[in-house]
Amino acid sequence: MKIKDISEPARFFDAVNSCAGRVELLTVEGDCLNLKSRLCQYIALTQVFEDKRIEGIELAISDPQDLSLLLPYIITE
């Protein structure tokens, strides 16, 4: 799913950490960030969400049930 922004990044990452499956951020450059990794969360927070470089970013979720945990924080296109 393509996303525009995350409304509350800290709470979003708390929700990501409680997900059962993989949660990945995919960029147009071909990068794949595992959002369950603290390092990748830091990169995503500082380089993507705070700098507003979000165009073309997709969120990939391996367990469809995890979507309900993340939807309150995702702003989609």
Image (tube, rainbow, N blue to C red):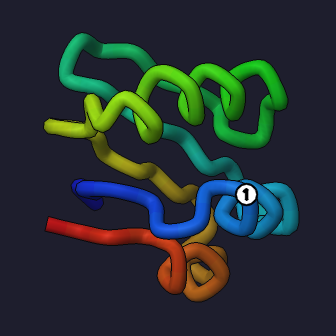
Q: Residue 20's spot in the image, x, y percent? A: 81, 65
Q: 11 or 61: nearer the eye?
A: 11
| Residue 49 drawn above or below residue 19 | above
Q: Quadrant of the C terminus?
A: bottom left
Q: Residues within 10 Å of mark 1 (few under 14, many from 20)?
A: few
For the point 86% across and 67% down, the residue is 18
Q: Is residue 25 left or right of residue 53?
A: right
Quadrant in the picture for residue 62:
bottom right
Q: 4 or 2: nearer the eye?
A: 4
Q: Is residue 2 left or right of residue 67?
A: left
| Residue 63 drawn above or below residue 58 | below
Q: Residue 17's spot in the image, x, y percent? A: 84, 56
Q: 22 or 77: nearer the eye?
A: 77
For the point 16% across and 37% down, the residue is 56
Quadrant in the picture for residue 21:
bottom right
Q: Quadrant of the N terminus?
A: bottom left
Q: Amino acid at mark 1?
A: Ala
Q: Residue 11's spot in the image, x, y percent? A: 73, 67
SS at badge 1 = helix
Quadrant in the picture for residue 75:
bottom left
Residue, far front: 50
Q: Residue 48's spot in the image, x, y percent? A: 41, 30
Query: Which residue is identified by label 1?
Result: 10
